[in-house]
Image (cartoon, rainbow, N blue to C red):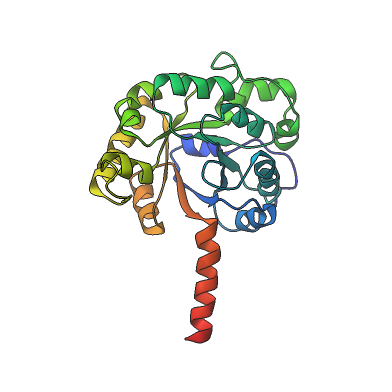
Amino acid sequence: MRTTPKPYELAARLRAGESLFTAWMSMPEPLLADLVAREGFDAVTFDMQHSSIDLLSAMRGISAVNHAGKPAGVRIALDAFGDGARLLDVGAEIIIAPMINSVADARKFASAVKYPPLGDRSWGGNRFVQLTGMDQQEYLQKANTMTVTLAMIETTAALAAVDDILAVPGIDGVFAGPSDLSITLLKGEKLDPNNQVVKEAFAKIKAAADKAGKLTGCYAPSPARAKELAAEGWGFITLVNDTLMVRGGAQNALQVARG
């Protein structure tokens, strides 16, 4: 457990080339987030786009994860860039924004979550000072590199614009979404995150990020796929979500007990 303030480490680990596995939370329950954070995950990420997690429950969850000694991330809701700044204020280290389909989208995202000269993030709150042990001036000087912004690439428009999105100042990297990519690339015919066209899109996204010297992240459809993605050099990888963890534990216990 973290007992003393320490600088954020997630960004530095990603920039050093590590592949990190994050748990993915959709239940608005900080006690569950605390339990998950005490396992071997490198981080815990809260999903505000496709879950019942609202701003307050995300903030409480971040606090629980930080208390357990782990970094917290958040996928904000669609176009909720202002929430990204508020979540950074309370200790999130990584913000993922969905449906970044253009340079204009990327600029709005970066503007909200990066301090000048990269953006227009407003100053406020002292939770981040308490967590890092830094004074306000030191945090201001380091925040833009110490926190991570990932733009989600999950549509044909985003895939076509990925190089330009990566070039936007304040965008630290991209996060590939296999489910929506499968829907858009297969023209709505089916949901197939393991389809070959999705894997080809992932390869294009990874190559673009590597060329730009930016970070990568992605949602893995399964732990086996997560292992493959780590071997390919992806950085911030979603390993499993809370629903699957709870259901899987229940199913395994029942199978053993009932035979």
Q: Is residue 167 visible?
A: no
Name the residue: 62% across, 47% down: 70
Q: Image quadrant of residue 60?
A: top right
Residue 55 image position (x, y, % from top left): 65, 39
Number of numbered callouts drawn: 0
Name the residue: 36% across, 25% down: 212
Front in this rendered view, residue 92 or 221: 221
Residue 2 image position (x, y, % from top left): 70, 48
Residue 29 image position (x, y, % from top left): 66, 53
Query: Would residue 135 appear left or right of 155 to someone viewing this image?
Result: right
Query: Which residue appears farthest toward the bottom when viewing the image?
Result: 259
Q: Is residue 111 visible?
A: yes
Query: Which residue appears farthest toward the front when viewing the image?
Result: 189
Name the residue: 67% across, 47% down: 61
Residue 108 image position (x, y, % from top left): 51, 21
Query: Would residue 185 appear left or right of 209 to someone viewing this image?
Result: left
Front in this rendered view, residue 40 or 193: 193
Query: Would residue 69 appear left or right of 44 to someone viewing this image?
Result: right
Query: Which residue appears farthest toward the top when viewing the image?
Result: 117
Name the residue: 26% across, 43% down: 186
